[in-house]
């Protein structure tokens, strides 16, 4: 009975991950949902088979979840600025928006 439940949770985890990815377009969220549900399946498997094999499987799934979760939580390298923002002190040659003059902003 417990083996069928583990298989059902695993299958539903895959379906839910794919549906989440297709419906929201957020691949990171879909992977997180998939990993959370696979963790639940691993813990159910551990409850059904409290031996060393079940424990090793649950530990592997949780370790994978932690590693991928850490990798997904960091921003992608292409999303940041390529260079720091220029300082306002160096913008004295730009025209001020309110007066059309050049000079130091805020003065």
Image (tube, grey):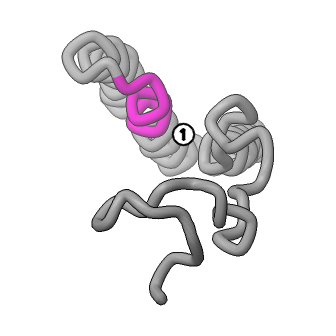
Give percent across and percent down for residue 40: 43, 44
Report the magenta residues as a range: 26-34
The rendered magenta stretch, by its main secondary structure, is classed as helix
Tell me, yes or no, whether the highlighted magenta stretch contains residue 96: no
Secondary structure category for the residue under label 1: helix
> Is 16 above or below relative to 100?
above
Would residue 51 be visible to someone looking at this image?
A: no
Q: Specify the farthest residue to the bottom.
A: 107
Q: Nearer the viewer, residue 29 or 43?
A: 29
Position of residue 100 in the picture relative to residue 72 (left or right): left
Residue named by callout 1: 42
Residue 64: percent from left, percent from top: 72, 39
- The residue that appears at 57% across and 71% down in the rendered structure is 103
Residue 21 x/y as whole percent: 34, 17
Looking at the image, residue 107 lies above or below residue 28: below
Left or right of residue 65, residue 86 in this image: right
Instruction: Report x, y in % for residue 94.
Output: 57, 54
Give the vertical position of 49 relative to 24 (above or below). Answer: below
Based on the picture, tell me whether residue 30 belongs to the magenta stretch: yes
- Give the side of residue 40 with respect to residue 25, left or right: right
**Vertical relation: 107 (above or below) 37:** below
Q: Nearer the viewer, residue 11 or 92?
A: 92
């Amino acid at each position: 009975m417990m083996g069928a439940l583990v298989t059902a949770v695993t299958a539903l985890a895959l379906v839910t991950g794919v549906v989440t990815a297709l419906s929201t377009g957020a691949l990171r969220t879909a992977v997180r949902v998939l990993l959370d549900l696979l963790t639940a399946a691993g813990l159910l498997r551990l409850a059904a088979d409290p031996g060393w094999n079940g424990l090793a499987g649950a530990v592997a799934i949780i370790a994978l979840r932690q590693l991928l979760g850490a990798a997904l939580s960091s921003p992608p390298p292409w999303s940041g600025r390529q260079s720091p923002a220029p300082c306002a002190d160096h913008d004295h040659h730009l025209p001020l928006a309110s007066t059309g003059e050049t000079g130091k902003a805020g003065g």
